[in-house]
Amino acid sequence: MAAKILANVIVLGSAVLGRAFVQAYRQALSNASKSGVAREAVQNIRRASKSMAEPEARQVLGVTEHASWEEISQRYDSLFKQNATKGSFYLQSKVHRAKECLEGAYAKKAQGTTDA
């Protein structure tokens, strides 16, 4: 008999807590949308996903506008290896993103010269 009462109390208590949690979550979402927090979070995600600009990429790798792809590749390899052993993952990521950006720029230039 006591076990049945205890089980009923646990089930009812869980149901009450579950409903309260759902209601609190809905209220939090409502408050976030009213204050613009949700929009700000989406904007931050969009900003973070944008690729690096070409001048910044050249600055990260330490190359000039007239650098050959061979020079860029060598610079990338040395900086990437250097940060892999005794550097930081953040800097290594920046170096990788810079190379990706310049690959895209050089691909566009190559298409432009072959199309003309």
Image (cartoon, grey):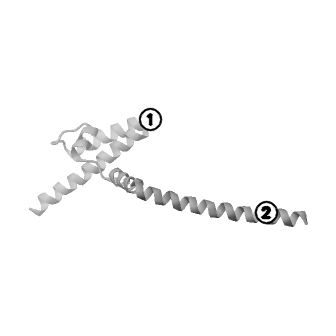
Q: Which amino acid does label 2 sit on?
A: Val
In the image, which disc is placed on residue 51? Answer: none
Mark nearest the camera among 1 and 2 is 2
* Mark 1 neighbour density, 10 Å: few (under 14) some (14–19) many (20 or more): few
Q: Which of 65 and 41 is in front in this view?
A: 41
Q: Residue 109, located in which quarter of the rendered image? A: bottom left
Q: Residue 55, located in which quarter of the rendered image? A: top left
* Mark 2 neighbour density, 10 Å: few (under 14) some (14–19) many (20 or more): few
Q: At which x and y percent is residue 11?
A: 75, 65
> Residue at 37% across / 53% down in the picture?
40
> Residue at 65% across / 62% down in the picture?
18
> Residue at 38% across / 41% down in the picture?
92
Q: At which x and y percent is residue 61?
A: 27, 39
> Residue at 24% across / 47% down in the picture?
53
Q: Which amino acid does label 1 sit on?
A: Thr
For residue 95, side relative to residue 65 (left or right)? right
Q: In this view, does 73 lie above or below 6?
A: above
Which quadrant: the C terminus? bottom left
Which quadrant: the N terminus? bottom right
Q: In this view, does 30 lie above or below 88?
A: below
Q: At which x and y percent is residue 43?
A: 35, 54
Q: Farthest right residue?
A: 1
Residue located beneath label 2 in the image: 9
Q: How far apart in space, not on screen, are marks 1 and 2 (Cα)?
A: 58 Å
Q: Is residue 61 above or below residue 8?
A: above
Mark 1 element type = helix
Total marks placed: 2
Residue located beneath label 1 in the image: 85
For residue 77, side relative to residue 31 (left or right)? left
Mark 2 element type = helix
Q: At which x and y percent is residue 33?
A: 42, 59
